[in-house]
Image (cartoon, grey):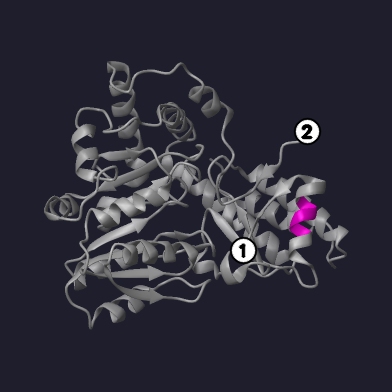
Amino acid sequence: MYSNILRHPGPTPIPKRVQLAMSQDMMSHRSEEFVHLFRETTKRVKPIFGTKQEILLIPSGGTAALEAAAVNTVSPGEEVVVITVGAFGNYFVSICEKYGFHVHKLEKPWGEACTAEELAAFLKPLSNIKAVFATYNETSTGILNPIEKLAAVVRTQTDALFIVDGVSCIGGAPAEMDQWGIDILVTGSQKAMMLPPGLAFLSVSERAWKVIEENKTPAYYLNLLSYRDWAANGMTPNTPAISLIYGLSAVCDLIEEEGGFSQTVARHELMKNMVREAMKALSIGLLTADEHASPTITAILCPEGVDLGAFLGHLKKKYHLDFAGGLGHLQGKIFRFGHMGYCFPSDILEAVALLEAGLQDFSYAFEPGTGVVAAQKVFLAAPKR
């Protein structure tokens, strides 16, 4: 039985060292050994977030952490702004509406980023905004929003908190939570963090903690004050995902061995450029402009004259190459090429070569090797680390 080559936006491949780390003997989550593991590991994650604040760990998917960020900061009837540029921006809209928040929705066409100028104009007539929610990396479209610039607009024009979904890019994209002025930053384990699903990460600014302390919306399992209090003692309020925390420690080892997080970010940027140049060489369209292209996932238009559903199924069956299809109204129109976490330039060259083989099977007109050569040129021109 062959293993598929998983080039998805998540879950993503797991390094063998991480798998081995997760197979260690179980321990009590109230033991001294766990306290040491928790404290040392969360400390090592801080540079990935760009923060001096504590990293809180929730045994859940990323969506639960997004919900925690909302319910702990905003009360029913209060006004919020949600920036949405795709399917996962709409997650924030749904969460906020479910809790009875008054939502002002800044919506962009799928495939476009939200600019600072657009956010500034949207906020200008509004007042009493409690929080602005944004998606850093929109998984459905391969867009990376200019979060640093958006944060500056929120800071200068409002007293609102700035809450960011970084689920599909933290661990592969630059993040400076403290410097940029992000109040809550969230991610999940199963994407650039190189872990299986089941662990969410969340960090909270001092400013946001003051709001949370005054918020009256009830929460139990997702009560961030409880997570903060227990984290001060090196624990979590409920049973944590101990195996995944073992794995997280190994992930930190891998990042440090690569030369630090800046080198990890550079690798993701390189792989993004390799994919994009390969598609351009093959005359296959890209959904997003280069300026706001994601370093962790590329949304690729259906090759002309190709039945996309049949093509993706063929790639998986014959070549064991597994891409993700489009979501929402982009279903059948795009496929998504994940290049995050445990992925390297050699993996990009392999995937492009197999993609080319599939294109030949579907009689797509191109010079064989064109995409591979384009990707290889990007790789060879990159600064050697």
Q: CA distance from mark 1 to mark 2?
A: 27 Å
Indicate the position of residue 167 as horizontal and vertical percent values: 43, 51
Front-most of residues 385 and 56: 56
Q: Secondary structure at mark 1?
A: loop
- Labelled pair 1, 2 in contact (Cβ < 8 Å): no
Q: Magenta stretch mostly in which secondary structure?
A: helix
Residue appearing at x 20%, y 73% in the figure: 157
Horizontal side of residue 175 vs 224, given as left or right = right
Q: Which residues are magenta?
A: 311-315
Assess whether residue 124 is covered by the magenta stretch.
no
Residue placed at 36% from the left, 61% from the top?
95
Q: Is residue 182 visible?
A: no
In the rendered image, residue 43, in percent from the top left (x then y), is placed at: 30, 33
In the figure, 372 relative to 140: above or below?
above
Question: Which residue carries the number 1 mark?
Answer: 326
Secondary element type, mark 2: loop
Q: Amino acid at mark 2?
A: Met
* Mark 2 nearby-residue class (10 Å; few <14, some 14–19, many ≥20): few
User: Farthest residue toward the bottom?
Assistant: 125
31 displayed left or right of 233:
right
Q: Is residue 184 left or right of residue 254?
A: left
Can you tell which quarter of the image residue 115 is in?
Answer: bottom left
Q: Earlier in the sequence, mark 1 or mark 2?
A: 2
Residue 78 position within the rendered picture, expressed as x and y whole percent measured from the top left: 20, 68
Residue holding disc 2: 1
Quadrant in the picture for residue 275: bottom right
> On the rendered structure, is 227 left or right of 385?
left
One can see residue 302 in this view = yes
Quadrant, the N terminus:
top right
Mark 1 Cα-neighbour bin, 10 Å: few <14, some 14–19, many ≥20 = some
The residue under the point 45% across, 76% down is 108
